[in-house]
Amino acid sequence: MPSLSLSETLHRLVHAYKKQLRSDIAAQEIDLPVTHIRALKGVCRNPESTAQSIALRMQRDKAQITRVLNELQQGGLITKIDNPKDGRSQLLRPTAEGEKIMTQISTSERKTVARMTQALSSAEVDTFIKLANRISKSVDEATAAKSETDCLTQKRPTSQPKDMAGKGAIELRLTAENAIGENHNE
């Protein structure tokens, strides 16, 4: 049987991890969707978390994350307090129940990792972590470079370059100011 491509291997690994983790979380009788778990994890790990920081971390729309956070708050898993550094936002904090759920989730994650790596030596796990981090970093750098390029190459709304339109407006204003000045001096 031919070996699988890197793409197929990564795909299978991600799905195997998710399937096993869902199973281990269900065994803990935690009835939260994955998005809620990820948001709760973000709140528990960062004492300065806000809806905006969670949305950025999860790379999701802030409105969607706000709904998730409101559901976590209604479920008694997080609280919101006024942000002393920015009156427009609120800091998110886990409740005692939220911390208890997070402990259960962490236990499930450790079980999942232990099951998935039981056939590997600690050196192989270390090597895998290093390689996976290098791959992730490479993707992040490529995404950042593409984003920067996209910002630089966006089309202007007018047929005239922005600098020329600005220069024309400045020249028109200077001409008008000079005309006023000339008339004033007469």
Image (cartoon, rainbow, N blue to C red):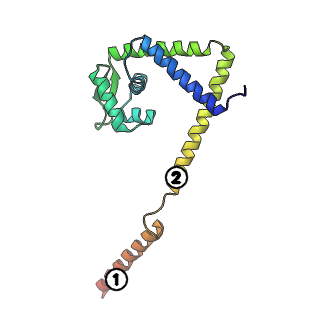
Q: Of marks 2 and 1, which one's residue comes earlier in the chain?
A: 2
Q: Nearer the viewer, residue 176 or 62?
A: 62
Q: Residue at x 52, y 52 (%)?
A: 150
Q: Residue at x 34, y 79 (%)?
A: 176
The residue to which callout 2 is attached is 150
- How far, Cα to Cα, is label 2 from label 1? 42 Å
Q: Residue at x 56, y 38 (%)?
A: 140
Label for residue 15? none
Q: In this rendering, which labeled residue sits more in front, label 2 or label 1? A: 2
| Apparent side of residue 150 relative to residue 30 in the rendered image (left or right) | right
Local crowd at mark 2 within 10 Å, few (<14), some, or many (≥20)? few
Residue type, numbered disc 1: Ala
Please state the horizontal and vertical placement of residue 185, each as a whole percent of the image: 31, 85
The quadrant in which residue 54 appears is top left
The quadrant in which residue 138 appears is top right
**Residue 66 visible in the snapshot:** yes
Residue type, numbered disc 2: Asp
Please state the horizontal and vertical placement of residue 127, each as a whole percent of the image: 67, 23
The residue to which callout 1 is attached is 179
The outermost residue toward the bottom is 186
Please state the horizontal and vertical placement of residue 79, each as a whole percent of the image: 29, 23
Whether the residues at callouts 2 and 1 have beta carbons within 8 Å, the answer is: no
Q: Secondary structure at mark 1?
A: helix
- Above or below residue 186? Residue 110 is above
Q: Looking at the figure, which quarter contains the N terminus?
A: top right
Local crowd at mark 1 within 10 Å, few (<14), some, or many (≥20)? few
**Residue 106 visible in the snapshot:** no
Q: Secondary structure at mark 2?
A: helix
The quadrant in which residue 119 appears is top right
Q: Looking at the figure, which quarter contains the C terminus?
A: bottom left
